Amino acid sequence: MIPLPESFYARDTVTVARHLLGQLLVHGHRQGRIVEVEAYLGADDLAAHASRGVTPRTRVIFGPPGRAYVYLNYGIHECLNVVTEPDGTPGCVLIRGLTPVAGLSGPLNGPGKLTKAMDIDRRFYGHPLWLSPVTICAAPSPPEVIRVTPRIGISRSVELPLRFHL
């Protein structure tokens, strides 16, 4: 499997979100095909953590692309985001759903379920996603039809059609 290069992520957030669909999230023997994502656009997107500016929690979002932004949601679930945009411009894509490929069972429909199943937590905060042990690898085939809807589970900027799924 070939990890996606840093340059893959150094594009606008919506483009990266759409192109992440169908790719493989890999951690050790666990592999899942990315089937659902949400784009978070930075300072002008009130649902984005980056809209609050640089904080110890969000600093990675403003840094180089292709890094993992992992945070604890509601004090319960770890969530995995992929940092996008060129260095200095905030943006990220939340990985919301996977279809198991190896080492996993059942659909992983929810960011908390997938990080738990993939054993991904905040120790991977800032991790370059083209390096072991957690990588996103090129899919063997292109994705099917992409559906676009508003994001779910948020209370701000809810009208934006930034949820993409297969």
Image (tube, grey):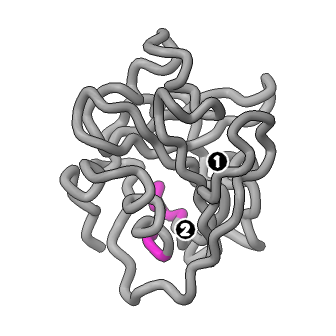
Q: What SS does tag 2 mark?
A: strand
Looking at numbered disc 2 in the image, what kind of residue is underneath it?
A: Ile
User: How many labels, in total?
Assistant: 2
Residue sitting at x 60%, y 29%? 71
54 and 129: which one is in front?
A: 54
What span is colored magenta in the figure?
22-30
Residue sitting at x 74%, y 45%? 158
In magenta stretch: residue 82 = no
Looking at the image, residue 131 lies above or below residue 75:
below
In magenta stretch: residue 29 = yes
From the top left corner, tell me how far across and down residue 73 is, in percent. 73, 30
C-alpha distance separating marks 2 and 1 = 12 Å
> Which mark's residue is nearer the viewer, 2 or 1?
2
Residue sitting at x 68%, y 27%? 72
Residue 34 numbered mark, or none = 2
From the top left corner, tell me how far across and down residue 10 is, in percent. 25, 48
Looking at the image, residue 90 lies above or below residue 115:
above
Looking at numbered disc 1 in the image, what kind of residue is underneath it?
A: Thr
Left or right relative to 148: residue 9:
left
The residue that label 1 is drawn on is: 115
Query: Callout 1: 10 Å neighbours few (<14), some, many (20+)?
Result: many
37 and 28: which one is in front?
A: 37
From the top left corner, tell me how far across and down residue 99 is, in percent. 64, 74
- For the N terminus, the image quarter is bottom left
